Image: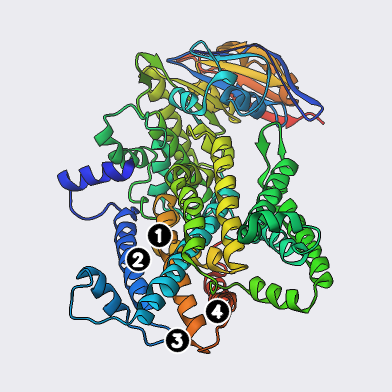
Amino acid sequence: MSGAANDRVAVSGPAEPLEGDRTARARTVILLLAAALGVTILLSLASGASDASALAVIGGWISGGAGDAVLSARDTIIVQDIRMPRVALGCLIGAALAVSGAVMQGLFRNPLADPGLVGVSGGAALGAVSMIVLGTTAFRPATALLGIYALPLAAFLGGLAVTLLLYRVSTRRGQTSVATMLLAGIALAALAGALTGVLVFMADDRQLRDLTFWNLGSLAGATWTKAMAVAPVIAAALATAPFLARGLNALALGEATASHLGIPVQRCKHVAIVAVAAATGVSVAVSGGIGFVGIVVPHLLRLIIGPDNRYLLPASALLGGTLLILADSVSRTIVAPAELPIGIVTAVAGAPFFLWILLRKRGVVDL
Amino acid sequence: MIESRELSVVIGRKQIISGVAFEARPREITAIVGPNGSGKTTLMRAISGDLPYGGSVTINGAEVSGLKPWQAAAMRAVLPQATALSFPFTVREIVRLGLAGGRSGVLPGEDARLPDRALARVDLDGFAGRFYQELSGGEQQRVQLARVLCQVWTPMLEGRPRFLLLDEPVSSLDIRHQLIIMDIARDFARRGGGVVAILHDLNLTAMYADSVHVVHRGRLAASGTPAAVLTDEIIEKVFECRLKVGAPPADGTPYVLPHSAIA
């Protein structure tokens, strides 16, 4: 709204940007990030354990198969059915994790808040682990009925259950206390972790291997079916961003002031919570625990374009997608032909980076 | 017009205010005074729509508890006593949040210029590019006031008065800026709006207020013009201080000269 108004002023008034207005910079950064995402997608399609040429495959589509390029069936399959769904999934999940982090931070008015912190990821993990360990015994009817969808659904339900419980605990008479929610979230995360531990203790050797790999996070099992299953959920969650952005900006001044400014604060919080639970639950279900994307990406972007959520949320989606695709490229090439779980890559790159940010900003920004 | 009847607020199990019949008219500055903990801020929060209350409070005839946030935001802007900010916003970005409701009252295209005009009014020219968290307490308070001014830039909207609800607007300001801010309030009232301000400075109250409500132990101890309310008797009893209220002959504005606290 006011962004559009700024444009009108820029046309009639002086050309230089208004002092303290980072709108122009934010828009430039978003364009650059979109370009970077495009380049990353192409590079990622072109690289991998096999020497299949993505350019040849794409060239083949463009010319409708009538061009000079003679494509081997093997290359087409590698690019279309292995690398593409994997890149699509990486992009979706990276965007979901980064935006979930940014929304959670805006909601809790704390730059360290993250779906991992308030137990949403923990709940989703508990759901998934229950399905892996008990899928052949107690949950047999569920696995029989749902097949490969049992695991994602269980993870999603676990994340949603924690979110609802969290909400129940911290909401009195329609008012959500952010402090209570944060503390309750930490307790629930610990509880989910403990229950997950019990299940791991019960698991047999084969299940343990599945668990370890899933828990570290991986996009290795990417298929078009999986990508298409998560795409609508993540797209719906991301679509709430324009509504949430205005509310989250006002929430930076506190709930009472946001309400004074005309923001329907309770509705805004409900939408934010459901969007985060859905995006996080689905991401954890498909790829396990991928850490640090939700904290590092919004934090880094705030340093560059400022905390205005109208720009922070779309920029987070773009950078999150880009970084996760890059991390996945590293994970599948660094020890090729074997694969490193992507969660290890994001943690190894993300944790020191996050510490560096904290050290650099210490004493300047109150965390 | 803001009007309350039999207004009461209970927080937890404690009755904070009860039986308050409050009135704030357009074209006037209405001051709320009273000792610490007497219920001034609670009264203000009930009027702002932040707290569930018993009895009734209306703004321009509409019951406050029944208003949607965006409806209330078009009728009144609220300056809280203190505002905590998370995330490093610039001064311009903060002031611009006042435009979030889209009812500043100016033409849509002129909205973008309001932050600069509001900052100029609160004597913060050239501060738009600074980071809010790096400013002094008094400067931050004036930035928040600029934000509040943007929200209800025109004191009247569609023929109806709008209100500024200010909780201790001058508490951390030097004397020059206290006068500048109170002049802004007076100007807002002269142009048709209404101002409700919680004030601690009784002399500033006497200078600027058109009517005064004295809050004491959750009830209104006195209401009326400054000359009627700011008397030795009322002030000594409510504030538990020995003092002397005088009036210079020129315009009869009372002044308060404190002597000592009553032990």
Q: CA distance from mark 2 to mark 1?
A: 7 Å
Give the amino acid at mark 1: Ala
Sooner in the amino-acid sequence: mark 3 or mark 1: 3
Residue A315: mark in rendering: 1
Residue topped by disc 2:
A33
Q: Residue at x 71, y 51 (%)?
A: A162
Residue A145 vs residue A125, the one in the foreground = A145
Quadrant in the picture for residue A214:
bottom right
Do the residues at pointers 1 and 4 share their chain? Answer: yes
Residue B168 vs residue A154, the one in the foreground = A154
- Residue A367 visible in the picture: no
Answer left or right for A182 relative to B93: right
Kindly state the secondary structure of the residue where label 4 is placed.
helix
Residue A210 vs residue B182, the one in the foreground = A210
Q: CA distance from mark 3 to mark 2?
A: 27 Å
Residue A49: mark in rendering: 3
